[in-house]
Image (spheres, rainbow, N blue to C red):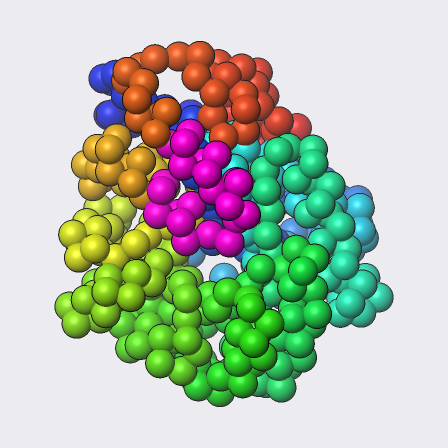
Amino acid sequence: MRQYPFMERPHRDVRLLPKAHLHLHFTGSMRPGTLLELADHHGVHLPEALSSGEPPRLRATDERGWFRFQRLYDVARSVLRTPEDIRRLVLEAAQEDAADGSGWLEIQVDPTSYAPRLGGLIPALETVLEAVEDASRATGVGIGVVVAANRTKHPLEARTLARLAARYADRGVIGFGLSNDERRGMARDFDRAFAIARDAGLLAAPHGGELAGAPSVHDCLDDLGADRIGHGVRAAEDPRLLERLAEAQVTCEVCPASNVALGVYEKPGDVPLRTLWDAGVPMALGADDPLLFGSRLAAQYGLAREHHAFTDEELAELARQSVRASRAPQDVRDRLLTGIDDWLAREPGASGARGASGASAGEPVPGQRADGRTGGP
């Protein structure tokens, strides 16, 4: 594990800080070791960028770079071919979250990506939801599903997905999203899909404010009635927008490591976490696609501490904001919020406390090896 400068002095372990994880994509949650094993099992050839053992070098701020990122993602997705593969992915994602202190996970999936191999849209979504139930029971991490439409596809497909999401609103689907390149497809083209989802009581969580800048956040608010913004970090470029987000308490799902990996910002210190924080904009830190970016949930809190000097009190408030912005049941929220207070009440460097997963410090949690690392076998 990388040693941060802040680790040289007593501190509270961010892995034991209870939190909610609100921005994690389905395929992108896969462990690198699982990708290699499933590719070998199914005879899928992986490019060196996915098989070298190191996160690929990416820069998606231009069309060519985004295309390369999307191609790698598509190859990774192609190894998920059976219900067993889906169950393994979801279980391991929950195990990784448990190891990082997450007690609630909202995982985003586009069922059209898996429908051809799983028998159609409905079987694909039901397979995911069954996997979610099993993983939650096995790890103690509560899990909700955000069904996401692809903004590069026709809005009619998004409406189909919104109806599907609405149908399963009482069976594990908690939200509706809109992902892929913000520079393609106008938000307003998907307004009817979001209206369908909203009528079913689903959370509206479209992507915006990552590649396309602050105007795309305005579009998500004005055209889609966004309850949360996937990323949203470039709202920092518009002071009036920051005021609007803060006043309405719209949470931005900020993914710092992803922002740097994709070239939105040059280095971690450039990600404007402090700008959003100082403006009063709620944030929920997320890992986005750890398979490609090499960084999971707790590392985002470590980044805030190391590069933006967030204190333990501020990190605790970030965790509270993630819980408040979630669709977790009230009893889960109460448990996590109490756990955050308990984490903060402990002396820095104290050991033996239990995190959101229920494991003690120094005691392996599900998905964590005895050496404290997580990942493939």
Position of residue 35 in the picture relative to residue 48 (left or right): right
Q: Which residue is found at the position 65% from the left and 51% from the top? A: 46
- Residue that appears at 51% across and 45% down: 330
Q: Quadrant of the N terminus?
A: top left
Part of the protein shown in magenta: 319-340
Residue at 66 percent of width and 55 percent of height: 172
Say which of 218 and 343 sits in front.
343
Residue 22 spot, x, y in % from top left? 47, 51
Taking the image as shown, residue 174 lies to the left or right of residue 82, namely left
Q: Residue 127: percent from the left, percent from the top? A: 77, 55
Q: Residue 31: horizontal and vertical position, in percent?
A: 60, 40
Q: Quadrant of the C terminus?
A: top right
Q: Is residue 218 above or below residue 269?
A: below
Q: Is residue 320 on the magenta stretch?
A: yes
Name the residue nearer the viewer: 40 or 241. 241
Q: Give percent across and percent down for residue 285.
A: 38, 47
Position of 340 relative to 268 (above/below): above
Could you say which quadrant of the image residue 53 lies in? top right
- Numbered label tally: 0
The answer to whether 206 is drawn above or below residue 30 in the figure is: below
Residue ID at (49%, 87%): 189
